[in-house]
Amino acid sequence: MMQSIKGLTMCLSKQPPMITKQSVQDHIVEPTDPITVECEATGNPPPVFTWTRDGVYLNVARDPQVSMKRRSGTLEIFFWGRPEDYEGVYQCTATNEFGSAVSSHIRLRVSKARTWLKEYLEPVSVFIGLPLILPCNPPAGPPKPQTYWMNTMVPIRQDRRVSMAENGDLYFSSIVAEDYLTNYVCTARFPNSNTIQQKPPLILQVLTGEGSSIIAMLGEELVLECFASGVPAPSIKWTKDWEALSMQGMKLENFNKTLRIKKVSMEDGGEYICTATNRMGSLDHIITVRVKSAPFWVEKPESLVLSRDDSGQIVCRADGIPRPQIRWLVNGEPIEDAPKSPGRQVSGDTLIFRSVVPDSTAVFQCNASNQYGYILANTFLAVMDMRPRLLGFRDQLVKVTEGSQTHLHCPYFGSPKPDLRWSKGGLGALEGGRYRILANGTLEIRRSKLQDQGTYVCVASNVIGRDEMEVQLEVKEPTKILRAPHNVIVIKGSLAHFDCKIQTDPTLEVTVTWLKDKKFLILGRRYMQPLDEDSLSIADVYRRDEGIYTCRIKTEVEEISVSAKLTVMGMHTQKKYNYRPDPPTDLEVSDPSERSVRLTWVPGLSNHSPYLVQYTEDLLADYWLVPSGWKNLTGYPGQLNSVVLKLTPFVGYQFRIIAINAIGPSRPSKPSIYYETGGAVPDAIPRNIKGVGTGLFRNNMEISWEPLEYREWNGPKLRYMVWWRRQHSREEWKNYTTYWWCSHIIYETDTFTPYEIKVQAVNDFGLGPESPVVIGFSGEDRPTVAPTDLRVSDVESTKLTVHWQPVPRASIMGEIKEYTVYYWRESSRLPHHNVGRRIKSKSFKANGPRLSGTLTGLIPYSNYMIYIVVANNRYEGPPSNRIEFQTLEGVPSAPRSFRIMHRHYDTIYLDWEEPAEPNGLLTGYILKYQTLNVSVGERMQEEHIPPNTTYFSLRRFDRYTRYKFTLAAQTQIGVGEAVTEESPHFTTEGKNIYLHTLRQSLSSIETHLCYVCVCVCVCVFDLDIATQGWFIGLMCAIALLVLIMLTVFFIKRSRGGKYPVRDKRDFALEPVDEKDEGTFDYSEEESRQGRSQGAIEHMQKMTNSDDSLMEYVEEDEIEFNEDGSFIGEYTGTKRDKDSSQYHESSEATSPVAIYSFA
């Protein structure tokens, strides 16, 4: 059974050997220093160390130059002759009575700083324009030297044409005439010995070479190189599997001729294409990269501790490319050659043990190897029996605060591995909820509560025995700060006070200390802490008292602190105290550059207040300045008086400073001198770059972008360089420079062709950064194919599903935007029911090989027509075939013109019209009614009316009973929308009608006209008062009054028309006095005759559409609705008006409107 090595070390008196330290596998040493090969191991009894070199036993005692450290296996070689004699592959073995542990193979090599052979290098000739490779061939290490090419101690300048390879060779893509002037010297530097060796000079003449494949090791660095020749010098571009490189973990160097991959992964394998291009053409070179890997651990083997007769296994899993071979060793020998052990079995990467005995104890090695390397791991099997032991302290007392996370520790050991249980008071096991037992035996209690306090018991048991211990837990109330100190600003010489009121658990001792700037504060005459309080008072404060004061509360279970700042204000010369700081003076600008400047000032009486630097800028555009107001730049602490400001190139600046304290800001300082930053190349990239077709033509593309702000120009004469080329083509980039416009149109393009687009800003100082490549498309054309297989399914009364087949991608002639369905109501399935044929549409996104969508809002029981088109961003394609479908029957809409009438005292009449949309065959109407203010228990009455009947009468108990009616039509599907009305009050319906009619008539009264209003009142009483004497007398008096008013009216009328016509033309209309509402002042009638005559023409232009009660007073019968309006207002016949009656009179008559109410 698996056990931890730490627990085994604490409990066992004997231990198999384990290698703890060894030298690296490739061990390179200097020839001038003693050689040390490390090998250390642990074990009990202490292990004995032996060494092999190149697989042969190394007798350390017989070699006087080799010794081994005491109590260690580390070799020390003090050579007097040739250090190369000790090179080889070393391996250390540590052995005791329980087995042997072996180290990795350590390859010992001596650093060699060899020199080139003395030789004369013949000059070589090469033609101008041809490529050339100058070999370096530096001396072999180890270690590998660093190479350089020099020309009389001056490094040779490398560029796109001349560059150095990783192996030191110097590549020329093409030779120019000036190359013969240089002596080429290859220099090698050996870093271990810091020595430099030079090759004899070479006078330039010719050599070529090439390559096509490479093997890369997983996790190591890979360098791919591509050198090309040509005139002009070609540019290099890399792709992988003919796609753009992601450049994640990659880096282009040496003018794109070197591709460096920092750490090779499995995804880095494949074909890398190096494309060399100049204006004469392009050439591709393919480098195939195959990724291989030395073995690495997937699951490293762990040591195993078992009891007698137990079973277990040791797993050793490794991987690599190719897959490594797993070999097991026992005490350093192959397991096949070791003595057989009963119950031990090898199964590939797993070592299985069954029914182990003490003799099964051994040290095992797992070796995983392939052709690129190997890895080795040591592990052991220990067989023992031990009763459980609890390794922690007994009778622990743990104190925690409420709400904290509590850990009760109980480290344990035993073989077989014991079962661990926690309980509180020895009752029940604690597991789940807020309790969790960790792998090391610790009990974790989350969000401790006061009721968690008590005694906890930890019990460990196995088949041999058990052990237990108790832990006492006390949960305390957490410390709370009731009143924390706050930042204080005081005047020099006054009293400063900080509060620190706390509440703690009464059973805990509390210590409150004060600190100033993280140093303990000594209380005394000036620093006082009142009795029975934890606050702090500082008397007669000085400048040196400024700082951060911290109240620290400490108990035996926790420690908390809270801080506040003290600021001391100075004295003023004129006033008693100075509350606002004085502004700084003498602002000075120095250390100018394109992007920064140093600003220095003399502080005023600022009392160490922070500073706010403000600036105003003039953006230097080409032909004008763009000024701005004062803006905040940044803030600085009060102790500074010189700062470096980050600025923008090609901008004019002025600066000023404001000092700020808690009271407020100072007055601004005087501005600094005017300063202009120098220009630089643009830093910003044009944003929102896009390319789309434009205009009425399909063979163009407009490239547009957002212009840079003036602040981003960084120099004069800003312009934009636009680059474009067709995507996935090998054609060169085309470019155009625009000075003002933020767009450029490319003509003669193919329809909807993708283009790679990039834009960079340019000014007089140079080119800015290129934008990322954006894909744009040329203009779109009208789609050529209509969708097919249009059909509908799941047809309901108001919705259905429409299906169609998508069109081919090539026929869209652009980017597909949507499919649009057009549909309209052709007719109703009901005879003689007219409908409108308004065309509607609905769009659906294209999302799948077979498309569908849902149409809603249809009208039931109707015939519809439908077709579909495909649309790109610009055009719609041809329509598909039209199909017809019918919606199912639905519920009807509400009945129309539902009216309630009182034709008799004891009967209510109702009538209505059929619904505007029956939505099917009507089967009848349902009328529900109930008296208002219904009493408890009264049920609503329901009437079923045939479909061809649109009226109903109800006999009521008395004329004062009111009803609430609800009417709805129905089809076979169900009951439709209902309409609800209430019957009006019988005793007030006439009054309501009169008031409504009066209100409607008065709204059409024209200004500047005279009206006579005659009112006839008819009162409706509950009793029959027509025979009452007083009522007859009242009616006679009213009639007499009306007769007198008519007589006065005709008298006034006969006087109003006698005045000259020319007076009428010269008489100016006066404004109407709006203070009199509906009354006449006959004393002013003479002065208004001209005004009345001027209004005659207005009356003659009135049309028959003007409503008034004059048109209805002579009708035989007038009916009223319950809301006070005429039933026959628009259905009755109006008396024809002949406009000539105004012209036949020889006298001008005043317009008169007589309103009669009956």
Image (cartoon, rainbow, N blue to C red):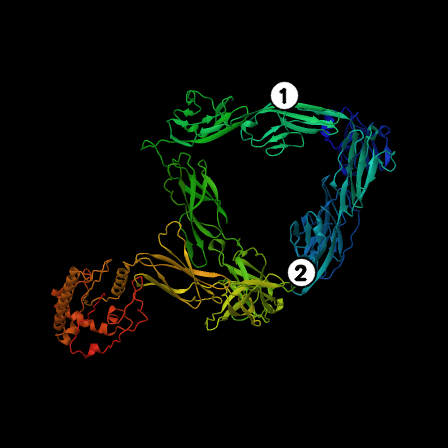
Percent across and percent down for residue 428 are 63, 28
- Nearer to us of marks 2 and 1 is 1
Crowding near the residue tagged with mark 1, few <14, some 14–19, many ≥20 C-alpha atoms within 10 Å: few
Total marks in image = 2
Percent across and percent down for residue 280 are 67, 65
Residue 588's place in the image compared with 888, above or below, is above
Crowding near the residue tagged with mark 2, few <14, some 14–19, many ≥20 C-alpha atoms within 10 Å: many
Foreground: 413 or 658? 413
Q: What residue type is labelled 2?
A: Pro
Q: Is 817 on the left or on the right of 12, as rendered? A: left
Q: Can residue 568 be seen in this view?
A: no
Percent across and percent down for residue 440 are 67, 30
Residue at image point 35% right, 54% down? 932
Q: What residue type is labelled 1?
A: Asp
- Look at the numbered discs 2 and 1 and tell me whether their residues touch, using CB distance below 8 Å: no
Mark 2–mark 1 distance (CA, rounded to whole Å): 82 Å
Residue 185's place in the image compared with 1135, above or below, is above
Q: Name the residue under label 1.
A: 395
Q: Can residue 322 be seen in this view?
A: yes
- The picture quadrant where one finds residue 779 is bottom right
Q: Is 80 on the left or on the right of 161, as rendered? A: right
Foreground: 906 or 492? 906
The label on residue 234 is 2
- The picture quadrant where one finds residue 632 is top left
Foreground: 1106 or 637? 1106
Residue 446's place in the image compared with 587, above or below, is above
- The picture quadrant where one finds residue 234 is bottom right
Q: What element carries label 1?
A: loop
